[in-house]
Amino acid sequence: MRGMTLEERLAAFVGQPVGAPGPAVGPDPVNQPMIRHWAAAFEDANPVYTDPEAAARSRFGAIVAPPLMLSTWTMATVQITGIAERGGSPVASDGSGAIAVLDEAGFVATRAVSSTTEIVRYLGLGETVSSSTVMASISDEKRTSLGPGHFLTWVTTYIDGAGEVVGTHEFCILKFRPA
């Protein structure tokens, strides 16, 4: 990628996987303890998440996971050692992605812009989930009130053990040079 303009280097990432190649397979199946902790943390008393009898009477017929837990089932285990050196990133990176290219070019600040989740269906206990993330777009340089920057959008697709899509998550950030 050396010898290419910044725009050419960034364009090469669009449509490509983000992070490790291949899907991230959830280390654990959908399970009651994680659902219980999530529901408690968000003070969500919906009985379809924690009460087997109430869940059996619901349209689901059994316990289901809160839909916005979708990403938790495939999250990498946090690595605390070296987190400061990684700029707060919870996992190590090989430093070869679009964010690293923008950091090298002086776009060192990050601001979350938008996050959209689409739930196709709820997950039940025991299901396994995997996810794949693709860089959907990287804008040309834009002038913003925070400074010049590029908008990066990636899409993560979540699939169940049968290969069916259960949800998607689109996330957009602004990588910018502070004004």
Image: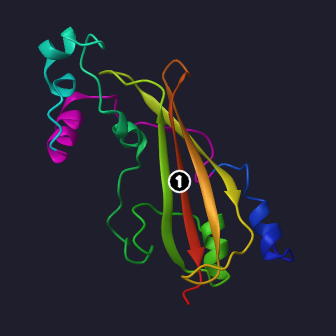
Looking at the image, which is closer to me, 24 or 178?
Answer: 178
> From where the camera sits, is residue 48 visible?
yes
> Where 78 falls versus 111 (above or below)?
above
Note whether 177 is above or below 163 in the view shown. below
The kind of residue on which mark 1 rests is Phe
Left or right, 139 with reference to 171: right
- Which residue is pictured at 49% across the width and 71% down the height? 111
Q: Secondary structure at mark 1?
A: strand
Q: State the residue lying farthest toward the right.
A: 3
Return the x and y of residue 159 as percentages of the image width and height: 52, 29
Question: Magenta residues?
Answer: 18-42
Q: Position of residue 47 (x, y in %)?
A: 16, 25
User: Is residue 167 highlighted in magenta?
Assistant: no
Residue 118 lies left or right of residue 29; in this view the side is right
The residue carrying mark 1 is 171
**In which quadrant of the rendered image does the N terminus lie?**
bottom right
Q: Residue at x 37, y 76 (%)?
A: 84
Relative to 154, residue 177 above or below: below
- Res 96 seen here: no
**Residue located 58% across and 54% down the image:** 19
Image-based side of 31 in relation to 110, left or right: left
Quadrant assignment, res 82: bottom left
